[in-house]
Amino acid sequence: MSRRQPRGQETRERILAVALSQFAGRGYHAVSVEDIASAAGVTKGAVYYWFADKDDIGRDLQHELYERLTREGLAALDPDADTVTSIRRALEVFLNTLDNLGEAQFFLRDAWTIPELGVGTRADGQDAVALLRGVLAGGMARGEIVALDPDAMARVLFGALTEATMYVLTTGKRGATLAVVDHLVESLGTGERAAGLTPTVTKGRGD
């Protein structure tokens, strides 16, 4: 994460905006700190005032983008709705927001494969798992979610969302992905909701 805050915040934001455009347009590995500084109209010293290196910029960008996605998803949680409906709405908003990130999608798709940027992603992921666990545990307490290990359920659901995110970024198939996510979340419900699911069985050649 970046090391400094308030003073000159507009410079930091300009550096990040330019870096995002450069990373999305040219690819992460093709862009240098010198390129970012030149395009932002600042000195290299100004970049290094705010960031330790290019990876620090990338981690901040990735964190801010996923923070935005998470914030939009959390805002869609409806305390008056049942837990399954609320989670479905939140994940739908998350994937819709992801699909509308514009050039940032190209950066996130590349960032997924860059080990140096993985530290920030893992930290954000732990926070998301904790939030999911709280929502799921509340649903279990109300009898709306099947009573299974909430820690395991949160991690499995987060893993599915992670794969869904990558699939949308690489294929653009938001609708198909959302349909699968909806079905998965519905399967966590209890009573009539769970009984109403009709899994599709695909037969192989030997069936």
Image (cartoon, helix red, strand yellow):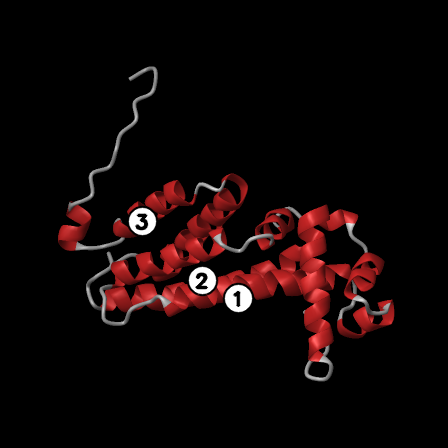
Figure check: 102 above or below 10:
above
Q: What residue is drawn where x is 59% and y is 64%?
A: 63
How far across and down, in percent of the image, does residue 203 sit? 30, 22
The one nearer the camera, 100 or 193, is 100
In the drawing, what numbered circle is on residue 182? 3
Tell me the kind of residue under disc 1.
Answer: Glu
Q: In the picture, which quadrant includes the N terminus?
A: bottom right
Q: Residue at x 59, y 55 (%)?
A: 104
Between 14 and 180, the one nearer to me in the picture:
14
Residue 206 screen position, x and y as percent: 32, 15
Label 3 sits on what residue type? Asp
Residue sitting at x 56%, y 53%: 102
Label 2 Cα crowd, 10 Å radius (few <14 / some 14-19 / many 20+) = many
* Residue annotated with mark 2: 129
Taking depth in this image into account, of 85 and 197 the one nearest to the observer is 85
Provide the residue designation for mark 1: 67
* Label 2 to label 3: alpha-carbon separation: 18 Å
